[in-house]
Amino acid sequence: MDGGGRYLQPMTAYPAGSTVARASTFDDYGHGSSRINFSKSAPRGGRRRSVTVPLARRLPRFLGTGLTLAFYGAVTLTGLWQGGHLDDFIRNNGEPHHAIARMMGLGLEQVTISGISQIRESEVLAAAGLNSQVSLAFLDVNAVRERLERVPLIKSASVRKLYPNEVVITLTEREPNALWQLNGELFVIAADGTVIDLMQDGRFVDLPLLVGERANLRSKEYLALLEAAGPLRSRIRAGTLVSGRRWNLKMDNGMDVRLPELGAVDAVTRLVKLEQEQKILEKDVLAVDLRIADRVVVRLTEEAASARAEALKKKPMRGKGVDT
């Protein structure tokens, strides 16, 4: 002890040559790190000092802000619900969780759409359910994609969120391929037969026309017939699927061309040849039947049939036989 009765050394003495476990002080945490160093030769019976991490270091950042917002949000919702104003609030501001997220700067401010040519941007936004009352934090991109792909004109869609305020939508559209008439209604259909919409747009008036039940599902067959028609394609107004088995072609002069169930493309090729050699489409014929491979059966108009009957009557008889 010194003259004042104080010890010159610590009360607890350690054997010579040993070192003492050192713990970092709270000042170490002020520099962004926490380190605990223990000596290699500390005695087994030695006491280790513990390091206590401040409570502020163990809690997530902005926890206080989040709890405060949650508290005020809960109070607000309770007041609106008890006062019967919750429906009005949702109608004017959207769902409460979206409203809170927008207050935190995560509102939807920009939508980028690519891949559209037939569908309008406003139609995409309406189908996706996107508006100014939505927030990115609670937006389900999978649900948005599924809603978009339920639109007949949209074949596939991808949706991405770009924080804090943007949604990117990429679409692949179905191309209008033909018109389909069923029960007096006219539809625009895609190549796979999917009905895109009612025919309400003059842009599609020149598309090939199919008529009949389930004719939309066999549009590729009909387009192959048009391809085989070559120079006569522009004179074919429509194709009617008969009993789900074969096609009838309606020509621009009202003539019907009946095609077989098998070998329809070959029959159309025969029609082209008949027109080139005999101008059959210019004759007074109501229908041309090509269902028999080795012959052509025609049905005359009433005027043509009467004229033919009169011509046969005037033709002189030979002997007692029947006129041929």
Image (spheres, rainbow, N blue to C red):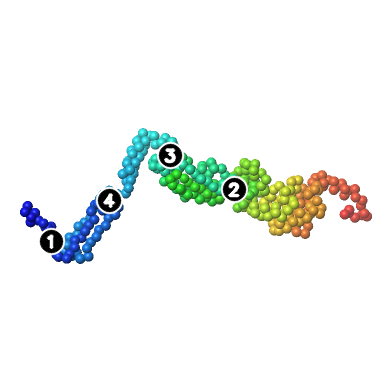
Secondary element at image label 4: loop
Between the C-alphas of marks 1 and 4, the distance is 31 Å
- Mark 4 highlights which residue? 30
Nearer the N terminus, badge 2 or badge 3? 3
- Which amino acid type is marked by label 2? Val
Asked whether the viewer can see residue 96, the reply is no
Q: Are marks 2 and 4 in contact (CB under 8 Å)?
A: no
Q: Amino acid at mark 3?
A: Gly
Q: Badge 3: how crowded within 10 Å, few (<14), some, or many (20+)?
A: some
Amino acid at dot 4: Gly
Report the disc number at residue 94: 3
Q: Which residue is mark 2?
A: 195
Callout 3: SS = loop
The mark lying in front, picked from 2 and 4, is 4
> Vertical placement of 164 versus 265: above or below?
above
Disc 1 to disc 3, how far (Cα)? 71 Å
Can see residue 126? yes
The image's mark for residue 13 is: 1
Q: Earlier in the sequence, mark 3 or mark 4?
A: 4
Dot 1 or dot 4: first in sequence order is 1
Q: Secondary structure at mark 2?
A: strand
Dot 1 or dot 3, earlier in sequence = 1
